[in-house]
Each structure stands twice: as C-alpha cells, then as structure tokens.
Amino acid sequence: MFKRKVFEELTDWKNNYAPKYAALLEGARRVGKSTVAEEFAKANYKSYIKVDFANITQELLDVFKDVANHKMFFLRLQTVTGVTLYPRESVIIFDEIQRQPLVRQAIKYLVADGTYDYIETGSLISIKKNVKDIVIPSEEHKIPVYPMDYEEFMWAIENDTYPMLRELYEMGSEVGNGTNRKLMRDFRIYMAVGGMPQAVEAFVEGKNFSEIDRVKREIINLYIDDFKKIDSSGLICKMYESIPSQLATNKKRYMISRATGKRKTKKDVERMADLLDSKTVIACYNTYNPSITLAQTKDDDTFKLYLSDIGLFTTMIFKASPKTDENIYSKLLGDKLSADLGYLYENAVAQMITATGRSAYYHTWEKENSTHYYEVDFLLQDKAKLLPLEVKSSATKKHESIDAFCKKYSQNVSRAILLSQKDVGKDNNLNLKPIYMLPFIMEEL
C-alpha cells in the first residue's frame, strides 16, 4: 500500500463528519479508491465489511433487497460475510457504489441510523444512468481521489529529495545546472510512469518501461471499454483519444467536431458531459474577464482538455504503435526526443493544479491588427490577484503572451511565472522556475 494524502482527508472525515455523513471517494477507475478505503478501515476500525458491487455473489446481493429494516439488514450482512460489526467501532465499505444506485440512495437512512460509519467508492458516479430515478443523498462527504501526485510518487519510489526541492524553492536562487538536470530527469521519470498506482507499482518492482507502458495501455483500454458502455456510438472514445492531437496543434480550444468528424450536436454536448464526469480528463476553461474571480468568468463552451494522469498522456502520444519502444522512453528521460513536447509539460501542470483541488483556467485574446491570439497557459487565483503561468518544454526566451497579459492586467497580477526545464532565474519581471517547483508555488497561494 502506497502512502496517499487522501488518508488525511479520510481522517478529517472520521473525526469531524462521521457519523452524520458517509465518505464518498470519487475518482477515475484505477486511481486507488478501493485500496485506500480498505487500508483506512483496517487502520481505524475494530472491524469492517467491504461489499464490492463489481464482484458480488447473489447471496450477498440479496441482502440488499430490504435495507429499510436496519436491524435485520445488519444481521443478514454479518451472517453472509462472517464479519462481526461493533456499534460506532465498525465501518461498512460500499465499493463501486455506482453499480447499485438504490443502495446509494439508502445511504441517507443508514447514516441516520448512526450505528456504523460508511465509506463509498465510485467511478462514473455522476453519469446520468447511474443516478436516474434516485434521490442522491445529501449525507455524502465527497472526497476526490486523484492519480498519485509528484510527492506521493517520490514517497512510493523512496526518493527522499522532495523536502530538498521545497528548500531550494524557498531559497529562490539558482539550483545549478548539474543539480537541475538531475532533478528534471527525476521529474521526467514521473512523467513517463505517471501516478496510476498499478504503473507506479510496476516501476517500483523494477519492470522496464515497455512493461510499464503495457500496464498503462490496459488502463486506457479499460477507460475506452467504459466509454463504449456509456455510449455505444463510440464518439466518447473519439473525444478522449483526440486529446493529445488537439493539444499538439496548439489550438486555443478543444473542438468536439474535430474529434467526432461531424458538426457538434446536442447529443455530443451530453457525451462531453459524460466524459468530464468520468474524471479521466481535466477541463481547463477559458476565462473571458480575468480581472475578477476566475470561476465567475469562465466560458463553459471554451476549454482545453488534458488527461487526468501524465503517465497515461505519455502513453497516449505514442499509442498509434502496438507498443511503445523502450528507446522512446530512454529519449524522453534524457530529453532527446525530436518532437516539441510542450503539450506534455502542459498536461503535467494541469494535473498538478488539479491535484490540489483547484480548477484549471487559461486566457486568450486577440492581438491588435492580427488574426492571431495571445494565450496564457494557466491562471491561478492568488488571493485577490492572479498568477499567470506559461509552460515551455525547453526554450524560455520567447514569452510574449505572458508579457502582454502582465501589461494588460498589471493591476491584477501578483507575479508571473514561466515554468520550464531550465534553472531558477529572472527575465525582467518574469520569474523563471523549473516545473518541479510548481507544487511549492501553489502552497503559497
């Protein structure tokens, strides 16, 4: 079991919200929700029962036909599972709760009974067919579960340099070329492996990158199978698979029609909503007036899409081949790939922003007397002001968009940062930071 930050959020739930609320661990498939729930139960309760609705016997499923009689329900549940429950000292885990909407609806009454605590885990939890005809309980304390962030990845591989990164950031001076190269190579390992626990486990076990890539392809294929179950037309799959190519073309927004090959329809908008609800992607919304609170000025129809995990994104880039050659990963780690992979680093930034619970925003506007646009890759709320971020994979000399943004919105900008693989530095008023320092930048917000 890897150390996960979501444990802290579950502890906060247990101490402050249970027994009035069930904890709902929500996230994409294979991010570790079930493992986290069970390990937390083992460590914090006298006993627990885990009901996996994705793999359940008919005998156990029959227990849920009558949940209204709580006393009888609890007795039958203990009899079938062979586990003794203790009032206020036991927790019941409903794994993959989206498969049994009526059980989810019953959470309201089970929580009100107050005898035990409840942890639900779910993926595709908000998909319409999974909430159709039920009253979604308000007695759920939602806890998002993301792929492992960079710090969690460092814990998993027993790399103890992360605290040093924080110290280097706080010093604010150059790291040094040799040290920065080493630290960037460490970060590119994270970009290559990603934060899906199965891929991280394969890396920890010493598997080569071709084998790790196979693990990630299996997860991608699992997502695609899920999308086909939601939408038999296969168009959600196309929307998902088109994300890297749309980012690579450097367009100012994601276009559904480019993914589907036809004019956007109302049904396509619904498909996009389902894709977003799957938590397999990250939406970065354009804000039309970045002078005030970002969430209030986002354009719901203008957005970019990134994958929720940088490792899956790396695999998706090369998915045209049946498998990704070990040599490609070797070149990626050595920063020797000939292609411009700026969008790969953008995806890493989008994931790091989302992992902190923040939403991602960007801003575009027309250049004067031109058909071209300025674009700031990401905007962060910095108290009452804004922190614009620009992301580069290598060169840091050209940064006209973020310069223009700082000039146009000077009264609303706290500071401006360009993230790249280069060392700490300064270019006039623009702060240059290596990408691995982004988590510490966000800690200050």
Image: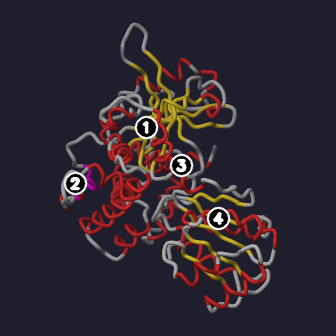
Query: In the image, residue 332 lies at what x, y percent?
Result: 26, 53
Q: Secondary structure at mark 4?
A: helix
Q: Amino acid at mark 1?
A: Asp
Magenta segment boundaries in residue numbering: 330-335
The alpha-carbon separation of the residues under discs 4 and 2 comes to 51 Å
Q: Secondary structure at mark 1?
A: helix
The alpha-carbon separation of the residues under discs 3 and 2 comes to 28 Å
> Mark 4 = which residue?
102
Q: Secondary structure at mark 3?
A: helix
Specify which label sits upstream in the sequence, 3 or 4.
Answer: 4
Q: Nearer the viewer, mark 1 or mark 2?
A: 1
Side of 301 where 332 appears, left or right? left
Q: Amino acid at mark 3?
A: Thr
Side of 275 where 46 appears, left or right? right
Specify which label sits upstream in the sequence, 4 or 1.
Answer: 4
Residue 139's image quarter? bottom right
Q: Is residue 53 above or below residue 241?
A: below
Q: Nearer the viewer, mark 3 or mark 1?
A: 1
Q: Nearer the viewer, residue 141 or 2?
A: 141
Q: Is residue 224 above or below residue 362?
A: below
Which disc number belongs to residue 331?
2
Q: Quadrant of the C terminus?
A: top right
The alpha-carbon separation of the residues under discs 4 and 1 comes to 28 Å
Residue found at x 37% / y 11%: 370
Residue 48 among magenta residues: no
> Mark 3 = which residue?
354
Tags 4 and 2 touching, CB below 8 Å: no
Side of 347 where 405 appears, left or right? right
Residue found at x 46% / y 47%: 275
Q: Amino acid at mark 4?
A: Leu
Which disc number belongs to residue 26?
none
